[in-house]
Amino acid sequence: MAGKRELLMLENFIGGKFLPCNSYIDSYDPSTGEVYCKVPNSGKEEIEAAVEAAREAFPAWSSRSPQERSLILNRLADVLEQSLEELAQAESKDQGKTLTLARTMDIPRSVLNFRFFASSILHHVSECTQMSHMGCMHYTVRTPVGIAGLISPWNLPLYLLTWKIAPAIAAGNTVIAKPSELTSVTAWMFCKLLDKAGVPPGVINIVFGTGPRVGEALVSHPEVPLISFTGSQPTAERITQLSAPHCKKLSLELGGKNPAIIFEDANLEECIPATVRSSFANQGEICLCTSRIFVQRSIYSEFLKRFVEATRKWKVGIPSDPSANMGALISKAHLEKVRSYVLKAQTEGARILCGEGVDQLSLPLRNQAGYFMLPTVITDIKDESCCMTEEIFGPVTCVVPFDSEEEVTTRANSVRYGLAATVWSKDVGRIHRVAKKLQSGLVWTNCWLIRELNLPFGGMKSSGIGREGAKDSYDFFTEIKTITIKY
Ligand SMILES: NC(=O)C1=CN([C@@H]2O[C@H](COP(=O)(O)OP(=O)(O)OC[C@H]3O[C@@H](n4cnc5c(N)ncnc54)[C@H](O)[C@@H]3O)[C@@H](O)[C@H]2O)C=CC1
Ligand SMILES: N/C(=C\C=C\C(=O)O)C(=O)O
């Protein structure tokens, strides 16, 4: 029909084949608010089929040597890299993030996830101890767990999905992955590359659909002994409940309410642009984003003035605009939720210094129904306010003053989350002291989001359970056994 646009139709990928589904969910382009894609609305039936395929593939895949699996992971990295531009375009359209970010961060990191685990799987050593007086030696062996259930969120779609798939298959597991129903397109495109990379059918199965329907079917399946999840705390609670009767292994990477602590000796030339980026990168939709900025009182006014000036230059634009720093938020519901936090802060007497309700967005006509919002800075807000305690997961950050080191660490630790913190100071002693006291799985000092994939990544308190990284992911995706030899 003239004028009617074709919708992109996704299919599940099970046992090396694309399979249609009985029903579909609408998926929206966040920059226009229009439906542009249909995502399979899978359920128990599709999970059964995926379990069967993963079960069949497991004996051969888990028997391959780490070297053989490593070769395939490297090939996967190569084919992903060859499709970088196509994947970046798709990620940006599906998620709302800028094309620049998808090109320079999301897809390169997805490539790196495979290269990194292709290499790290070759370098694990097991432990061995001697009991000479008993004529015994003991050693450990690690074996893959079986079928891994992987559930990923919508903020960094392919980046976080591959961060789970790569270590799981490197260790010899087969996987059933469920991306977010809001951002499924790059996972589907990824499936098209598996054959080219030599991934045997059934090793990677991807099943699309909603959390309550297909996510719960995956989590509840008795033949899936392990779940790796990244997403919200309430969903993690539900996953924990469903997993409990089966004693499943769980890795839970959850949210944050991440503090930036800025001491009076901080290098503001570096700190201000880095803190704008840490607050608003990817529309503030990264669990590591800063949302509480504590500034030492002697530099508070200067910092605030310069920070607001820099935030006003953080350009909101359509995702394809190369000069845009920020695109659209993921969904209408999420945009409304983020805005409601700003309104709540205002009714509590806080001041909105720029952004939502203060400045005007300027967008092309076609994008005016898109889910855009200006980066917003709030001040004169109490530590107990929901904007200072709850994860907003959007472009909103609060700035408050502090007086002493002791006081600021206590205040920074006063929330239920404990994922990532930044500390800005030139005093090395102070940096070490504060970093040690912070209840946070990650502390970046004088920088943000410099990732060392070898080392543990994850949060304390309500920010999750478990860690990911070279050794941590290997430990999680394998079972360990201690063997004693009497000679
Ligand atoms: N990494 C993080 O810290 C993330 C935090 N969030 C937070 O969560 C809030 C809500 O976002 P959502 O997309 O609703 O996150 P969510 O936690 O509901 O979704 C994450 C993934 O879990 C799946 N899921 C949802 N319910 C499930 C269930 N009952 N069983 C199994 N899987 C299930 C979803 O389909 C998706 O694939 C955001 O506003 C943000 O605050 C969201 C995404 C990532
Ligand atoms: N888990 C998240 C980010 C991880 C980043 C990384 O591994 O570098 C998130 O935003 O949910």
Image (cartoon, rainbow, N blue to C red):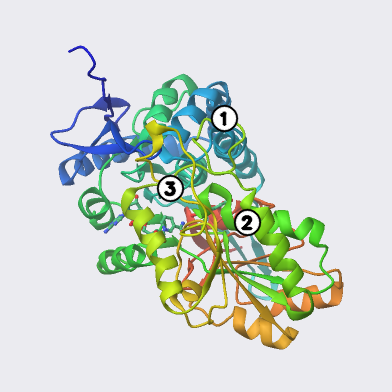
Compared across the picture, whether 61 is left or right of 467 comes to left
Q: CA distance from mark 2 to mark 3?
A: 16 Å
Whole-percent x, y for residue 325 in the image: 59, 42
User: Looking at the picture, which amino acid does disc 2 mark?
Assistant: Ser
**Viewer can see residue 449:** no
**Disc number lying in front (1 or 2):** 2
Q: Quadrant of the N terminus?
A: top left
Residue at 47% of width from left, 64% of height from top?
255
* Closer to us: 84 or 339: 339
Residue at 56% of width from left, 21% of height from top?
82
User: Looking at the picture, which amino acid does disc 3 mark?
Assistant: Leu
Residue at 73% of width from left, 67% of height from top?
303
* Closer to us: 308 or 411: 308
User: Looking at the picture, which amino acid does disc 1 mark?
Assistant: Ala
Badge 3 element: loop
Which residue, given by chain and number where applicable, does mark 2 sit on? 278
Which residue, given by chain and number where applicable, does mark 3 sit on? 329
| Residue 96, picture quadrant | top left
Precedes in sequence: disc 1 or disc 2 = 1
Badge 1 element: helix
Which residue, given by chain and number where applicable, does mark 1 sit on? 77
* Closer to us: 103 or 474: 103
